[in-house]
Image: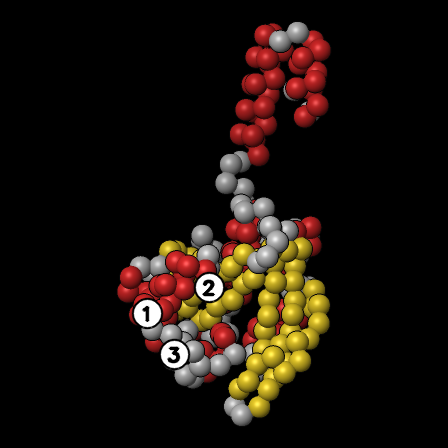
Amino acid sequence: MQGHLVRLQPLTEDDYELISGWMRPGLTASLASGGPEFPSAELLRRRAETSGESILMVLTRDGRKVGFIRWQSKKYAGSYEIGGAIGDPDYWDTGCGAEATSLVLEHLFHARNAHRVQFTVGMFNVRTVKMLLNTGIVIEGLLRDYFFLDGRFHDAIVASVLRDEFYTLDEWGAIEDVVPEADKRAAAEEFQRAMRERWNGDVFEKLVGRSR
């Protein structure tokens, strides 16, 4: 997945070590998960293999690995939750995290037939809170005292975007199809011309004409 600022690619073995370092106790881990996790590279690898969680590395255009983004399917088909972090502080407030999120949203809705994508964000995560508020994603409510951080509990924001809402959000920009629309139309027209000659009128109208 390629954007203007970043590209997303599958993890290598070394990437698990890099993410493990980012997720040690500190600001990055707190923003990404609500608190320190102490995850080893092996634990991250096993979690990805057994939980159905998908993780991609976030790279700048010049190939620097600056963060990760992950998503996981929820209970009902077509429902997902997104999380992640820009682990390199030099790339905070640069738009890399927002673009990585938009690329995954595009993938889930446009390639995976997602219906609903959810975010659960700590009330202390000012960058992600601003992103949610500025993009038109629907704020559904609060989870009271959901995260424990710095000696006290903090609320979490629950937000989501539905399929039809995503396609109306101008903030994410136009979505480029994998197969150009002109090629799709050409294939359908070629098929219809051939089948009109081979099938009688009733069969053609029932099977092909309905899709025009």
* Colour style of the rendered protein structure: secondary structure
User: Dot 1, crowdedness within 10 Å: few (<14), some or many (≥20)?
Assistant: some
Judged by depth in the image, the label closer to the viewer, 2 or 3, is 3
Does 30 sit left or right of 140 as displayed? left
Which residue lies at the image location 44% right of the left edge and 81% below the top edge?
Answer: 36
Say which element carries label 2: strand
Cα separation, mark 2 vs mark 3, equals: 18 Å
**The disc labelled 3 sits on which kind of residue?**
Phe
Circle on res. 69: 2
Please report the residue visible at 70 percent of the width from the left and 64 percent of the height from the top: 138
In the figure, 141 relative to 56: above or below? below
Q: Are marks 2 and 1 in contact (CB under 8 Å)?
A: no
Where does residue 34 sit, x and y in percent of width and height? 52, 79
Disc 3 to disc 1, C-alpha distance: 10 Å
Q: Residue at x 36, y 63 (%)?
A: 46
Between discs 2 and 1, the one toward the N terminus: 1
